[in-house]
Image (cartoon, rainbow, N blue to C red):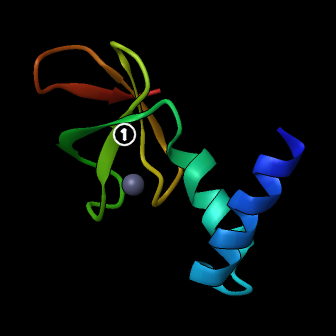
Amino acid sequence: MGRMKEIYIQSLEEEYGDDLSGYFNEQSMYEGFSASDITCPNCMKEKLAQDSETDLKCFKCGHEFIKIGEKTIKFK
Ligand SMILES: [Zn+2]
């Protein structure tokens, strides 16, 4: 794995330059989440990300919500 990872990171560096930390943050932030079509009712700027049947989170303002109906959510 060690060698593969080195090559992987090297190719990322070529693509992203010195901004690797930003790349990795973005990846881990969205890991395990799927996009919903519900706009965040707190900041109204970003669609909520869904990480389970009932848990939603806004990556813009950081608020978390619980889904209580088809299109209904409430603040956690
Ligand atoms: Zn928000």
Residue name at image x 61 percent, y 67 percent: 23
The image shows residue 64 at horizontal and vertical percentages of 48, 35
The picture quadrant where one finds residue 51 is: top left
- Observer-nearest residue: 13 or 56? 13
From this view, report whether residue 28 is shown above or below residue 55.
Answer: below
The image shows residue 53 at horizontal and vertical percentages of 33, 12
- Dot 1: within a 10 Å radius of its alpha carbon, few (fewer than 14), some, or many (20 or more) residues? many
Q: Is residue 12 left or right of residue 5?
A: left
Q: Quadrant of ligand 1?
A: bottom left
Residue name at image x 66 percent, y 59 percent: 25
In the image, farthest residue toward the right: 2
Q: Is residue 19 left or right of residue 46?
A: right
Residue name at image x 69 percent, y 81 percent: 19
* Disc 1: which residue: 49
From this view, report whether residue 19 is shown above or below residue 25.
Answer: below
The image shows residue 55 at horizontal and vertical percentages of 41, 22
In the image, farthest residue toward the left: 70
The image shows residue 26 at horizontal and vertical percentages of 57, 59
